[in-house]
Amino acid sequence: MTPTSVKDEKGSSKSDVSELELFASDNGDGALDPVESLRIRRKIDCVLMPLMCILYFIQYLDKSTLGSSSILGILNATHLDANELSTVFYLSYLVFEYPQNLALQRFPVGRWLSVNIFIWSVALCCHAACRNFRELVVVRIILGMCEGSITAGFLLVSSMFYTRNEQMLRVGYWYLMNGTAQIATGFISFGVLHIQTKGFQPWQWLMIITGILSFMTATAFWFLFPDSPTTAWFLTPEERATAIQRVKVNQTGVGNKHFKKEQFYEAIRDPKTWGFALFSGISNVTNSISAQAPLITASFGFTYLQTSLLGIVSGLIEIFTIWTGVNICARIPNSRAYIGAIYILPNIAGLLMVNLINWNDRIALLAGQYLNGLGTTSFVLMLSWLNAVTAGQTKKITVNAIMLCAYCIGNAVGPFMWKQKYKPRNHVPWAVIGACYVSCITLLLLLRLYMSRENRKRDAEPQDENADTEVYVKQETADGEIVKMLKVDKGFLDMTDVQNRSFRYVL
């Protein structure tokens, strides 16, 4: 974690002794060796990326079990409304999102995530024993409560280990595991449909299989997932110092365990906080298409076995579009808003196809349905963009929590559009989704305009000769004896993007 700094009257500050030297500028006054920096990044990738990708795969696999189970018999077996259960899940996610973010700041990230995954794996297995709506509500509440830690935890860890451009690629890579999970869900659903067990239905086998996979992931995270560069078990002390110096350019710090009220208030007063939150909420109203996809595809005239396998194509499309989107943005500076907007345009084309093409032309209808999966890329770009333009640990967890709460609200209200009276064409929900697509494009461009103007404003500010980029910090023993003074770069002092006038927003 970053040292906790409290300025005294002379402009120096007190700090924790334990990890302070890792942040001292003396460790990195010279330019980093690019070969060594690349080696450290690859070492970080070898540990972090497999774990993050596996967990995001498991997360989506678990979250989509209800949608998959809807064509495996759960609706008839438990007499439930899948839309209501989906809403329960996201309302639980919403209620527990900010407490989860506070816990991620207070406790070791890896251990906290592993505890949540373990509880979630038990709850998932318990689905198989549920026989009615009330019992399923309980386990869905537990799932929603636990899942609130995953995306927020990954965003925090990504900002600690990677530069802003690297974060965009890595966020894209672990998020595209949702598409991989769709593929796996299709094969698993197809497989369990062929399991004939007396007294145990295919949807119950699906819950047990995914629950076991989640338990195995929880075990791996407990032992292997690092909490920050300062304590990463796979890095030597020298490599930890290099890992920290690598991300100095972010100007966002590396972590701080202390809650700062002034950062909290700044977060809720920051216009871009609510711009990103609004985008998150609106874009996830459209995410209801994913939950409805098996039922929509089946309504085109495909059998349940065909529907399970056709879901694989949606996963492939999501993988391809996210991978291309983040890589294009990585190669074109300050292009996040423009690329995100472009990737939403095929969704609008797909929406028109599903609503205007003859209902008997099921192949063309299916193509339109697939086109509606391309816009996921814009949400992924938003996640990495938000992470890159927010500094200060308390502000970051607050902004992430607000954005993810909006994510929950969007996902919670979206399913209620898909009412029986609108079937089979569903013109009303599709119209709402079309309005959401246009709104998302507008919000991306407005956010870019706002931050571009802020950058120009900071460029025009007179240079403060007293505003040094380094701060001298007192290193003290437990009894208050000063050991030495260490020069620490301002980017490591847990300053917010508003407080640090050297901070520039990536676009």
Image (tube, rainbow, N blue to C red):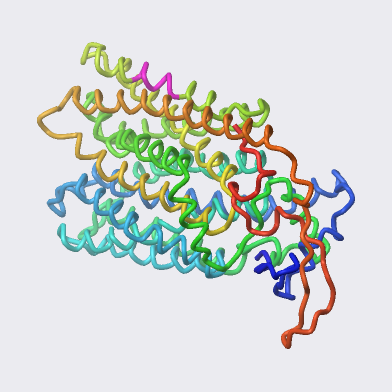
Residue 203 position within the rendered picture, expressed as x and y whole percent measured from the top left: 27, 51
Residue at position x 65%, y 62% in the image: 228
- Say whether residue 386 is left or right of residue 77: right
- Say whether residue 506 is left or right of residue 383: right
Q: Examine the structure image and report whether residue 355 is included in the region drawn in magenta.
A: no
Residue at position x 40%, y 39% in the image: 280
Q: Quadrant of the C terminus?
A: top right
As drawn, 260 above or below 381: below
Residue at position x 66%, y 43% in the image: 503
Residue 238 position within the rendered picture, expressed as x and y whole percent measured from the top left: 83, 63
As drawn, 80 above or below 277: below
Total marks in image: 0
**Which is the main secondary structure of the residues drawn in magenta?**
helix
Q: Examine the structure image and report whether residue 345 is included in the region drawn in magenta.
A: yes
Q: Quadrant of the N terminus?
A: bottom right
Residue 290 position within the rendered picture, expressed as x and y whole percent measured from the top left: 34, 36
Give residue 9's quadrant in the image: bottom right
Between 203 and 331, the one lying in front of the other is 331
Between 247 and 49, the one lying in front of the other is 247
Q: Which residues lie in the magenta part?
A: 344-350
Give residue 254's quadrant in the image: bottom right
Residue 12 position within the rendered picture, expressed as x and y whole percent measured from the top left: 75, 67
Give residue 369's quadrant in the image: top left
